[in-house]
Each structure stands twice: as C-alpha cells, then as structure tokens.
C-alpha cells in the first residue's frame, strides 16, 4: 500500500508553485523527482568523505570507495544480477547502449543483422545505425501495430542465423507499452543472437530480474529512478563483458601500463576509465533503497490505478486520441486533441502549473508511424495523486476551449 501523504513529504519540490499554481509534475518519463533522503546522501558525501576512490590509503578514500562499491551492490540486488562485477557504472542508459554497440564492432560483420523494435528511443537506434555503418551489418526493424504492440509473428520470421543482436526497450517512453521481453529474449537466443534491453523506462515501475530474464545486457538511468542525473548502470552477463573490449582508455581501467603494452583491469573496472561519478553511484544506491522501502509491487499497482483513472477520464474529452493502447502499459499516456498542436496545450498547461512533455519524445520513428508531429505526454509516478489528475483534466478542458 502506498502512503501517499507520507511519500509526498519526501519530495520537497512537490511543494513549489509554478506560475502561481501548485506544481503538478507529470513528466516522470523524462526524469523523476528526487526524495530528500537522496539529497541528504549527496550532501553527506560532500560534507564528510569526498575523496577519489580505489587509489588512496587514507580514511576518506576508503570510506568513499566502500560507499561507491556499496552502491554497485545495491544495484546488483535491485536487478538481481548474479555478480556485482556484472554491473558497470555508466553516465546513463545512452552511455550503456553505446558501450555495447562499440564493443560489438568486433562481433558483427557484413551480412549480419541487428534487429531493433519500431518503438525505440533514439538512443537505442542511433548507436546501432553507427555500428552497422562501421561494420556493414544490416539494421532491421521489428514492426508494431496501431495499438503500439510489437508483431511477434513478424519478429519470429525475421530471426535467422544472420541475426547477431536483438535490441528492444522493456517499456516504450513514447507509448507506455510493456514489451513481452520474456518471449523476445529466448526467441533471439534460439538463433544464437544476443539481446540488449533498454530498461530506462521499465526499471522505475516494474520489478526486473535479469537472471530470470536470462538477458545479455540491460541498461538503466538513475535519474528516472529517483536518483541524480549523470549516473546509470549497464548489466552484462559476465561471459559477454569478459569478451567485449574496453570502451575507453585511461586511469582506473588498467592492470599495468608501459609504453609497449597495457593490460586491462578485471571487471567491472575494465569499462570504467577515469574518475567516475562517485557521489552519483552512492546516491543511485540510496535512491534504490528508497524505492525498495516503498516496494516495486506497491508502486506498480498504485501507478496502474492512476493510469486507468486518467485514461478513462481523458477519453471523455472531445476529439482526444491516445497513442499506445496496449493492454500491458505503464503509466504513460501519449495523446493529441484534434485540431490543436501539442505544443500549444503544453504551453497553456505550464501557465497553470502542470509539467508535461510535448513533442516527439526522442522517438521520431514512432511519430512517423502514427503520422503526427508529436504528442502531449502525461507520465505518472507513485508520488502523483488522483486529485492532481482531476485538476489536470479541468485545466486540459480549459486549454481545449481556449484553443478551439
Ligand atoms: C530516457 C530514456 C532513454 C535515455 O536515457 P538517458 O538517461 O537520457 O541516457 C533511453 N531509452 C528510453 C526508453 C528512455 O525512456
């Protein structure tokens, strides 16, 4: 059960006003808000034990190292990875995908195929296009239907011994669709392909178990999980991470350096060149503690209630169309109102204190598929309420009347 009054007190930002109105923050798919306890962890780090990690013998360096590696273990537990060195700290989902795409330069060649889904974020499209440009491999798109659901029979037909990699988001940030990755992954494995799942949009809302999924790579961003920006994680199966070459060279990632030859550090440090985002790694761990305390099951259930409540009421608005009507969805609602540009609604709603996203949501191919320039997207989190949804609907109706 969600104790909403208690939870809202954890987020100082929810008390502020925007343009004279109480803030309603419905842009959680872009970034989540930060609870006070995570801010406290950041202040505590810089107040009491700010130091570089892994190299110092002094007390501060040891404390910082312990807390940073503690963050890694919390991530390991959150995603149920078998080993903590299967968790690579990154700057975010985009970084994690690029790390894998760069590494696969050595594992794909002309004639090979990389499959991506039709509903990917640009960060899970462009690195694979670049990989294909470098190697001569071919990028193929798994199609979807008008509900925003992947066509699994088409996917089955596309798989062959040429398929080296299948990449797909767990949840679409533009449509909210939860993709059936527990089917997608074994189907790819059956033809010997590896699978990378973009978990940026799923990890804040659904319990993820990378071992049960048997996924090869899984990525997430702390800033969508109540943590800070600039830190994220890449899970990789040990056998894959051992095979992949390092992404960047520098300090921290080496075992021994001479001008003739350098040997690389063991996992996970092979992929963590340079001084990392130490405070970020610690705060990421704290954010996961916070989410665990509330419980992913309770979060999922509560957000689903918000989704159903808002969807039902939105559909009563004249000329309103929702994009992404899969039965399996997270609390993301992408919509347009006939004859009104999404940007105009977004601007008016901001005047009323409501933060939501308008535009293509870094998923232009999805917009092209529906032949629209963009949508208005409301995305809910466990700290949102039905009262906020009611006020949002009133404001939306006002905006609609002003614009038509
Ligand atoms: C946010 C998001 C990304 C990009 O995450 P960054 O934190 O910007 O690297 C990728 N994929 C999906 C589905 C997302 O929602």
Image (tube, rainbow, N blue to C red):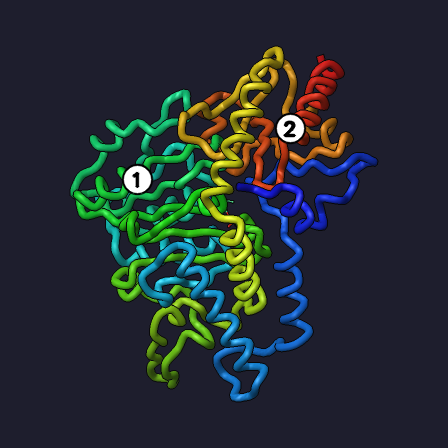
User: Vertical placement of 148 versus 173: above or below?
Assistant: above
Residue 308: image x %, image y %? 52, 25
Q: Position of residue 169 (x, y in %)?
A: 40, 41
Q: Residue 305 carries which label?
A: none
Residues 112 and 239: in front is 239
Give above or below for 267 relative to 296.
below
Q: Is residue 61 or residue 103 the one in the foreground? A: 61
**What residue lies at 62% left-to-right and 77% top-to-bottom?**
49
Query: Hey, which residue is sitting farthest right in the picture?
Result: 20
Q: Which residue is drawn at 37% across and 51% down?
A: 218
Q: Which of marks 2 and 1 is in front?
A: 2
Tell me where residue 372 appears, x and y as whole percent. Answer: 53, 22
Residue wearing tag 1:
115
Left or right? Give the position of 31 relative to 369.
Answer: right
Instruction: Please provide percent x and percent y for residue 189.
Output: 21, 46
Q: Under 8 Å from ligand 1: the CB of mark 1?
A: no
How many neighbours does mark 1 have within 10 angstroms: few (below 14), some (14-19), or many (20 or more)?
many
- Identify the residue at horizontal 47%, vertical 22% (top origin): 370
76 or 259, which is in the foreground?
A: 76
Quarter of the picture containing the C terminus is: top right
Question: Which element carries disc 1, helix, strand or loop?
Answer: strand
Tell me, yes or no, whether the two marked residues, 2 and 1, touch with CB atoms within 8 Å. no
Is residue 138 visible in this depiction of the protein?
Answer: no
Residue 66 appears in the figure? yes
CA distance separating discs 2 and 1: 38 Å
Q: Number of marks in the image?
A: 2
Q: Dot 2 lies on which element?
A: helix
Q: Which of marks 2 and 1 is nearer the N terminus?
A: 1
Mark drawn on residue 389: 2
Quick one: which residue is furthest to the bottom in this view? 57
Q: What residue is at 81 percent from the left and 36 percent from the top? A: 19
Few, some or many residues within 10 Å of mark 2 (<14, 14–19, 20+): many
């Amino acid at each position: 059960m969600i104790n909403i009054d208690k939870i809202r007190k954890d987020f100082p930002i929810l008390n502020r006003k925007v343009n004279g109105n109480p803030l309603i923050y419905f842009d959680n798919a872009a970034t989540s808000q930060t609870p006070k306890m995570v801010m406290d962890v950041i202040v505590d780090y810089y107040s009491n034990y700010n130091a570089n990690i892994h190299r110092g013998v002094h007390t501060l360096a040891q404390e910082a190292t312990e807390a940073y590696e503690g963050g890694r273990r919390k991530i390991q537990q959150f995603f149920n990875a078998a080993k903590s060195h299967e968790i690579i700290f990154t700057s975010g989902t985009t970084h994690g995908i690029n790390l894998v795409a760069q590494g696969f330069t050595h594992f794909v060649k002309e004639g090979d195929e990389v499959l991506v889904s039709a509903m990917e974020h640009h960060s899970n499209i462009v690195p694979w296009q670049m990989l294909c440009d470098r190697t001569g491999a071919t990028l193929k798109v798994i199609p979807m239907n008008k509900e925003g659901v992947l066509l699994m029979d088409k996917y089955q037909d596309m798989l062959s011994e040429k398929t080296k990699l299948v990449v797909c988001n767990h949840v679409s940030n533009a449509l909210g669709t939860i993709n059936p990755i527990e089917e997608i992954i074994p189907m790819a494995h059956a033809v010997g392909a590896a699978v990378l799942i973009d978990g940026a949009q799923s990890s804040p809302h659904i319990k993820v178990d990378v071992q049960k999924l048997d996924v090869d790579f899984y990525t997430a961003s702390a800033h969508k999980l109540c943590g800070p920006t600039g830190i994220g994680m890449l899970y990789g199966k040990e056998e894959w991470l051992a095979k992949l070459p390092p992404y960047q060279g520098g300090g921290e990632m080496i075992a021994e350096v001479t001008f003739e030859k350098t040997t690389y550090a063991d996992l996970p440090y092979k992929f963590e060149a340079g001084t990392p985002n130490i405070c970020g790694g610690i705060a990421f761990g704290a954010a996961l503690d916070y989410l665990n305390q509330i419980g992913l099951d309770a979060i999922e259930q509560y957000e689903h209630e918000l989704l159903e409540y808002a969807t039902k009421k939105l559909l009563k608005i004249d000329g309103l169309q929702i994009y992404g009507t899969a039965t399996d969805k997270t609390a993301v609602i992408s919509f347009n109102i006939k004859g009104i540009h999404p940007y105009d609604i977004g601007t008016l709603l901001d005047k009323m204190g409501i933060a939501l996203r308008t535009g293509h949501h870094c998923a232009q191919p999805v917009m092209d598929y529906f032949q629209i320039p963009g949508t208005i997207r409301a995305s809910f989190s466990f700290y949102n309420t039905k009262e906020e949804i009611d006020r949002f609907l009133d404001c939306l109706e006002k905006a609609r009347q002003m614009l038509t």
